[in-house]
Image: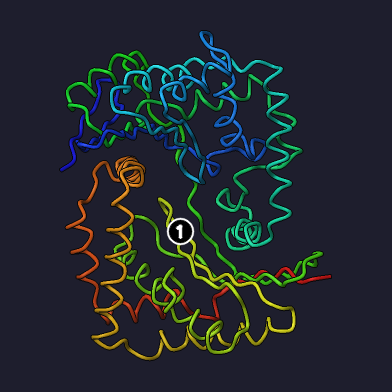
Amino acid sequence: MYQTHRLQNGIRLIHRQSTSPVAHCGLFVNVGSRDEHAEEQGLAHFIEHVIFKGTHRRKSFHIMSHMENVGGEINAFTSKEETCIYSSFMHPYYERWFDVVSDITLHSSFPDKELAKEKDIVIDEINSYLDTPSEQIIDDFDEVVFDTHPLGRNILGTPEHLKTFNRDSIQNFIARHYVSEEMVICSVGNIPFRRLIYLADKYFGALQQNSRVHNRKPSSDYRKRSETVTRQNHQAHCMTGSPAYSLQSKHKTALQLLNNILGGPGLTARLNMSVREKHGFCYHIESMYQPYSDSGIWGIYFGTDPGFVEKTMKLVHKELGKLREKPLGSLQIKRAKNQLCGQVNIARESNLNEMLYIGKQMLHFNRCDTLDEINKRIGNVTGKEMMEVANEVLDERQLSKLVYTSG
């Protein structure tokens, strides 16, 4: 189903042939906010912005319009561990994508005027989170769980750090991390794979082969913490959770199933049925699980009236206790597996989602599971394993807590 190739310089390719007139192509780089030094907080994300601001061949407008002029779009994102530049476009324009993405990745000039302007834009982006406590608390909770570890840092950085960035700090960071062995080109579109290889070699083949010069520091020494922050909000916003399994863990799928049962996107998730439907304590409650290459984080978020915080937390702990103490019946497990398989398959129905998924999988595992393999892995999870995982991860004695209370 998926075709893979490695260029001589180490850049990896993964592709699925599609008959759709619309193609999707991305470049993943195995670098994110956790790879920054203490004085570089926010630099990975800032680079994702400023690579679009000019190269030796193009000005900012010409970069932005290059794909738009043929009806396509170009975008990018930065996470804790990855940076991705990707596009959706009509399939005859693959070479146009390779031309512009290789240019901004390998030949950005970082004009001083554009750097200054973009700092203000990113600072505005940081400030916008202050108006969205339901999003900010998720970022702040990372710091509660991971403390001083780089995984606890906000991806956007701080205004103070942003103001110190210059062309030298940007180029030094790129030289350390934008290396061929840590790059993956992923594609879902109507193009022969041999043509994709040719274009990749033409536009990225000149990049010198190189590998990561430092290893990521693993997260350890977790200590339960509880913090309350007073803010001028109408609602109280709450997060509770703890460290969880990594991308490499054999228990990852079992935790995904438990997370889905507890507070996944389905309206019948246990937290939604108990806290919202039965008691009416909040409009929105969910649980989330984010695995990283060597660690992970699991948590529950809810927003509620300040007078309902403790009552809601008691209901949360009650539902966690049920999963730890009462084995799931065979019908419940079957329903949970069908639900998760359905969500995965529906998400992969989007070629854009599939392209981003296979790129990340190739980056971290050097392969990509097919849908059949994923469905089989979900099907192999046992009730015994789910209960063991629940007792290890969902133990309320180990849960940290962060509350934004109204002042």
| Residue indicated by mark 1 | 290
- Residue 240 location, quadrant: bottom right
Quadrant of the rendering where the N terminus is positioned: top left
Please, which residue is most extreme toward the top here?
57
Question: Which residue sits at x=36%, y=16%?
Answer: 208
Q: Position of residue 211 (x, y in %)?
A: 38, 28
Question: Which residue sits at x=65%, y=87%?
Answer: 311
Q: Nearer the viewer, residue 245 or 360?
A: 360
Question: Which residue sits at x=46%, y=73%?
Answer: 263
Mark 1 surroundings: few (<14), some (14-19) or many (≥20) residues within 10 A: some
Work out whether 269 lies above or below 252. Answer: below
Q: Is residue 233 left or right of residue 171?
A: right
Q: Position of residue 231 (x, y in %)?
A: 80, 64
Work out whether 175 lies above or below 314. Answer: above
Q: Position of residue 399 (x, y in %)?
A: 56, 74
Q: Is residue 221 left or right of residue 258?
A: right
Please, which residue is most extreme toward the right here?
407
Q: Is residue 145 left or right of residue 159?
A: left
Question: Which residue sits at x=55%, y=73%?
Answer: 285
Total marks placed? 1
Q: Position of residue 306 (x, y in %)?
A: 74, 78
Quadrant of the rendering where the C terminus is positioned: bottom right
Instruction: Name the element at disc 1.
Output: strand
Q: Is residue 405 left or right of residue 154?
A: right
**Amino acid type assigned to the residue bearing label 1 in the image:** Gln
